[in-house]
Structure formats: C-alpha cells, structure tokens
Amino acid sequence: HLPFPMNAAAREGRIVVVAGHEGSADSWAESWPALAGVARDAGYATLVAVPYRDREGAVEGVLTFNWREPHRPDAEETLYLQTLASQC
C-alpha cells in the first residue's frame, strides 16, 4: 500500500481529511508524517480525498481538494465535495 491519503481513500472507500500540520490526530504530522514536509513545502495545510464510484458502487478514483490554511469541511461542505466527486 502506498502511503498517501488518496490511496487510503480509494482502498477504504471513505473520505480522508488531513487538516493542518500539528496539534490534531488528523494532522499531516500525526496521520502522514512521511508527507508532512512535502505538504508544508508545497504550501498545503489541508487535503480532502473523496472517492468516486462507478455504477456498481466500486471505487473508480479519488478527487482531491487542497487548502493553504487549516480547514475542516463541515457536513454541508462534505456533501458538496461528495456531489462533485460523484460527477466524475
């Protein structure tokens, strides 16, 4: 398994949120330490990986969204991101 949030989203069929660089369980430093420096250098604080599915329900790919500031999508925004991914 490749150590990337997008791969986890595809493998597990769930949304993966990596929010901020320090101080929370879903931060880069805690969740994906091997990528923390890369994300920081690229200017990304938050990544949300949303799997999209084919008509039979199998994961077909993952759409990612990035923020330059720490951000946690609320329920309404998560639904919006899922809707966007479902259009792929």
Image (tube, grey):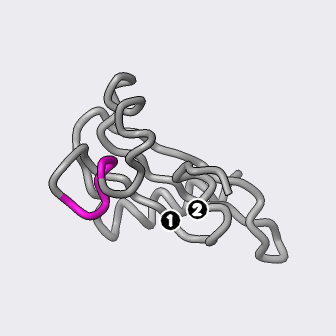
Give the image location of residue 35, x and y in percent: 44, 39
Give the image location of residue 52, x and y in percent: 67, 61
Q: What's the mark number on residue 9?
A: 2
Residue contact at pointers 1 and 2, CB within 8 angstroms = yes
Q: Residue at x 41, y 63 (%)?
A: 78
68 lies above or below 5: above
Q: Amino acid at mark 1?
A: Ile
Residue that numbered label 1 is attached to: 15
Q: Amino acid at mark 2?
A: Ala
Q: How many residues crowd around disc 2 within 10 Å: few (fewer than 14), some, or many (20 or more)?
A: many
Front in this rendered view, residue 36 or 42: 36
16 lies above or below 44: below
Front in this rendered view, residue 42 or 32: 32
Q: In the image, is 84 to the left or to the right of 61?
A: left
In the rendered image, the quadrant that contains the N terminus is bottom right
Q: In the image, which residues are magenta?
A: 24-29
Q: Residue at x 33, y 44 (%)?
A: 46
Q: How many marks?
A: 2
In the image, farthest residue toward the bottom: 56
Q: Secondary structure at mark 2?
A: helix
Q: CA distance from mark 1 to mark 2?
A: 6 Å
Q: Main secondary structure of the magenta part?
A: loop
Q: Quadrant of residue 34?
A: top left
